[in-house]
């Protein structure tokens, strides 16, 4: 019998209150749309990061507006600014305190490579101390660039084998 | 102008070893290190130089003697005039200078920075620790023999160093320090960049 169902949205009467999906899809869907950032604002990039959080660019559209200043509650560390060697230990410790799964965005030239600070005091790229998922170019990057980085990270998380990782953990 | 001439004259009457120092802007004097606390106290109490605007040092490079000169910039908030006082450190290898934190509390961090960057010990300072670099850093970065790129040393935190296997490395210079071009209207042109872009990590520096 050909169904005459014209429902476009989920209708519990028709579906019998059951949704069939893959665990990966559900877990990744949840993770991508509630990625709470740890704002590691260390220099001028932090100002752009604030711009991303404010109404004009509005990172809330991607579910990442909840800037968590406690690493225990954060999923994604956004390293926004110049990391000095003196600060590097603090960055690493905060990364260690974040609960998994966790991701890192290196925002701007300084966090990605040391930027123009080719000097004795500056860590030459935050990837020397923490694993970076997305690098953002710019000095500082435009807010759109950071939003693009977040979308790239969401795409990456959507491809993760989350259920397998959870079961094997 | 007569007031500023007076201050250097009065200082030289009181401290006969003081000499006039060449200066393009404000009046300046040289002092022996031993006279520094007494002379600065005289300037503060008798001549109204109540503000220590800056305290820094000069490294005249290895081999020069005297090698280190500490420079004080004094300002009189009543007389609206500056005075520069310079004092050579007696020892070139273990430079030291009497602290003036008793005269200006604000000298505290200036002297710590000066100690951090040049290795000049300020005798009588209440808490002479490094202020910019971390405790245990083995060098004084603003000394002339210290390269801008830095020297390989362990990370300040041993645990983090063990977890990451990272060290403080000499920064890759790739064509020299990145400098901005002032006065450029085109922001793309004015952005900080190496002036010599003919070489980098992948392409050797061409023979001169």
Image (cartoon, grey):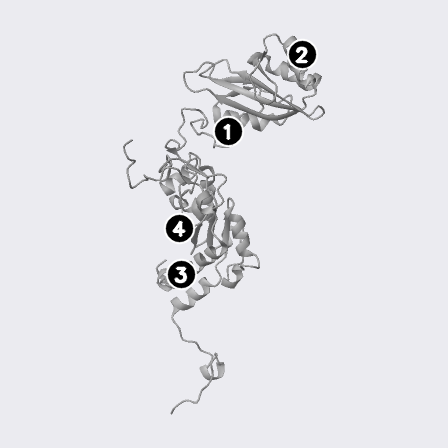
**Pointer 1 with pointer 2, Cβ within 8 A:** no
Rounded to the nearest whole Å, what is the CA distance between mark 4 and mark 2? 63 Å
Tell me: residue B140, above or below residue B41. Answer: below
Disc 4 and disc 2 on one polypeptide chain: no
Q: Which residue is mark 4?
A: A132
Q: Secondary structure at mark 4?
A: loop
* Residue A29 locus on image (x, y percent): 44, 66
**Pointer 4 with pointer 3, Cβ within 8 A:** no
Q: Which mark is residue B130?
A: 1
- Mark 4, mark 2: which one is toward the viewer? 2
Rounded to the nearest whole Å, what is the CA distance between mark 1 and mark 4? 31 Å
Disc 4 and disc 3 on one polypeptide chain: yes
**Pointer 3 with pointer 2, Cβ within 8 A:** no
Report the residue that reaches farthest toward the right: B78
**Pointer 3 with pointer 1, Cβ within 8 A:** no
Q: Is residue A98 visible?
A: no
* Residue B131 locus on image (x, y percent): 52, 31
Q: Which residue is mark 2?
A: B10
In primary-sequence order, the first of circles 4 and 3 is 4
| Crowdedness near tag 2: few (<14), some (14–19) or many (≥20) residues, C-alpha within 10 Å | some
Choose between B170 and B206: the one closer to the eye: B206
Choose between A167 and A126: the one closer to the eye: A126
- Mark 3, mark 2: which one is toward the viewer? 2
């Amino acid at each position: 019998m050909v169904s005459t169902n014209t429902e476009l949205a989920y209708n519990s009467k028709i579906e019998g209150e059951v949704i069939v999906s893959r665990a990966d899809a559900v877990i990744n869907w949840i993770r991508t749309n509630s990625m709470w950032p740890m704002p590691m604002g260390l220099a001028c990039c932090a100002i752009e990061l604030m711009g991303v959080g404010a109404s004009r660019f509005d990172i809330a559209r991607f579910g990442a507006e909840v800037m968590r200043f406690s690493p225990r509650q954060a999923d994604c560390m956004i390293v926004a600014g110049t990391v000095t060697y003196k600060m590097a230990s603090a960055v690493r410790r905060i990364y260690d305190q974040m609960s998994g799964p966790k991701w890192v965005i290196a925002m701007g030239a300084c966090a990605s490579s040391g930027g123009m600070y080719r000097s004795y005091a500056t860590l030459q790229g935050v990837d020397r101390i923490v694993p970076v998922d997305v690098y953002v170019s710019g000095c500082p990057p435009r807010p759109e660039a950071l939003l693009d980085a977040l979308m790239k990270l969401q795409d990456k998380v959507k491809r993760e084998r989350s259920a397998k990782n959870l079961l094997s953990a | 102008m007569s007031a500023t001439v007076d201050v250097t004259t009065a200082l030289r009457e009181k401290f006969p070893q003081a000499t006039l120092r060449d200066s393009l802007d404000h009046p300046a004097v040289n002092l022996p290190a031993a006279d520094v606390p007494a002379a600065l106290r005289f300037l503060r109490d008798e001549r109204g130089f109540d503000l220590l605007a800056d305290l820094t040092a000069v490294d005249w490079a290895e081999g020069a003697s005297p090698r280190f000169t500490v420079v004080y910039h004094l300002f009189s908030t009543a007389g609206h005039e500056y005075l520069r006082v310079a004092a050579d450190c007696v020892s070139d290898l273990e430079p030291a200078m009497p602290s003036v934190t008793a005269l200006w509390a604000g000298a505290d961090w200036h002297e710590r920075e000066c100690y951090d960057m040049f290795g000049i010990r300020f005798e009588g300072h209440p808490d002479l620790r490094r202020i910019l670099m971390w405790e245990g850093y083995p060098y004084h970065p603003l000394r002339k023999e210290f390269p801008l790129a830095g020297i390989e040393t362990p990370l300040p935190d041993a645990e983090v160093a063990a977890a990451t296997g990272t060290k403080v490395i000499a920064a890759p210079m790739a064509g020299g320090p990145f400098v901005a071009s002032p006065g450029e209207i085109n922001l793309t042109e004015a952005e900080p960049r190496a002036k010599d872009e003919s070489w980098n990590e992948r392409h050797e520096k061409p023979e001169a």
